[in-house]
Image (cartoon, rainbow, N blue to C red):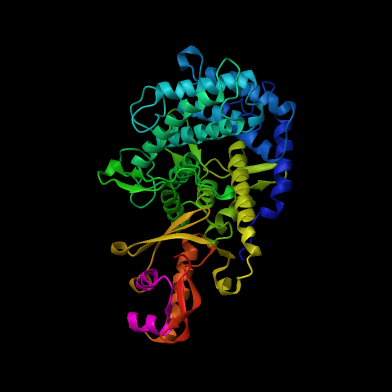
Amino acid sequence: MMKLAGLASFDKRVVRASRTLLEHQGFDGGWGLTLSSVSSIVNTSEVLAVLRGAGVGGTPVRDALAYLAGAVEEHCRPRQKGGRGENTRFVCFGLNGLLHYPEFFTQPEVTDTAIWCVDWLERHQIGHGWPEVAGIDDASLHQTALAVLALSRLRDTLRVLGPELALPGGADTGALATRVEPLIGHGLAGLLYHRRSSGAWGWRTYVDTAPSPSKTALCLMAVAAASGHRPSIETVIRDEPHEVGGVHGRPSALRPSQIVAEAGQWLLHNHYRWETFVENDQDVQGTAWEHMAYALGVQGVLRAGGNPYDRRLASAWRLMNELWDDEAGLWNEPGASGRRATIRAAYYTVTAYQAAQQRIARLSMADTNPDTGADAELGGAPVELREVSFVAASRQIMMTISEASATCLVSQRLFDLAFLLHQTPNGLAVARIAATLHIAPSSVPKYVQRLNKAVAEAFGGAGVRLVVSCQVEDGNASASGYALAVR
């Protein structure tokens, strides 16, 4: 199995990074992009995620939450009134940051600010999402994805607190949740409207731009969060079909699990486009915004149910490992300006490694299954296949396991094999398979192996088998044969 570079050192490094960050916390409780920068909502929110990962609590966290609670509204004032602009990202990062420590949500200043953020997002929603800056008519994929991620986290926090918990200011969790749900739906519909037929998203809305790895990863994670699709906890809350791709005039109906899986596959197939790259976002006005594509791509793949040990992720893991700066006690950020230790690089690297740890823990649960011999060549332990469907026109096989879905495009011969077994739920003898497909009996096991390998790769290397060996009744005798793993 491929070594995941940096994983063995991650826990120690995130603790060291948290000490570095605490040593450089501003007097106002916040942090900026670098250790000496002026505090900002974006970077303070990112630091809270790192501190949470290191298990840090207490006064520094309370001070950071107080900074966010006091800064969100001030940041969002028009520049001529002393603010930094009516930018959607300030609201979304502020709301998301407050929720990294949900145990503090019922504190009056936290609750009030969260409700203020919901008010702002209600007022400034436009067709197909949210704009980069209030007053602009064009929806931004970046801002809409950020809004859906933050609102989904708020929804999940409210569910944990319970439906009738009284909140400071006279509101309650149930009433707030009823306001959040339609906003999530609005953002989700906007993201799906702009989704490409390839499974990716472009870097801008409405314009036929090249696919963007960073926007694809962000939109994937937003769709997953909105629908409750979480591989680490084995649940898909809402997986009803949604209209997808309307911007191109050829909408189709797909389930969120399919959308997430296909986006994850696009990222894997195009890993060379993002595995060592920082992607500039030309759609952000007034600042040079950079997406850490190497970490976002990994997170997207893992959120889609990919295997952290997939070889197509190796370069990204190696880069993140090499970005650690032991002298600075933080991760460096690659880019045109040269490597420098930044909060942004730390945040994206930490969240990528955390996603890997969660997926490894989930995949390791399958190790208790004793039926591992037949899957040795697939590089993973067996994973139960729950659903399978076929699209004959495009030779696609769509499959669902407990924590993810994937679509596999195969050759005509492999598709015919899978569909033949789908039509015979009790399985077929090797000889009958060979006769139906007009191949030699000795070739049947080879085709089965190729089909299972293609299916496993569709799930990022996980040990998923579509076809299993079995004994079948052939006339008056029992014979060796094959059947689908799900019937």
Q: Quadrant of residue 192?
A: top left
Is 21 on the left-hand or right-hand side of 420?
right
Residue 268: % across, % down = 47, 56
Q: Quadrant of residue 103?
A: top right
Q: How many marks?
A: 0
Vertical position of residue 160 compared to residue 481: above or below: above
Vertical position of residue 1 compared to residue 435: above or below: above
Q: Nearer the viewer, residue 397 or 134?
A: 397
Tell me which residue sits at (74%, 37%) in the image. 19
Residue 423, magenta (yes or no): yes
Q: Which residues are magenta?
A: 416-437
Residue 208: % across, % down = 30, 43
Is 452 on the left-hand or right-hand side of 418?
right
Q: Nearer the viewer, residue 271 or 260?
A: 260
Tell me which residue sits at (47%, 20%) in the image. 119
Q: Is residue 257 visible?
A: yes
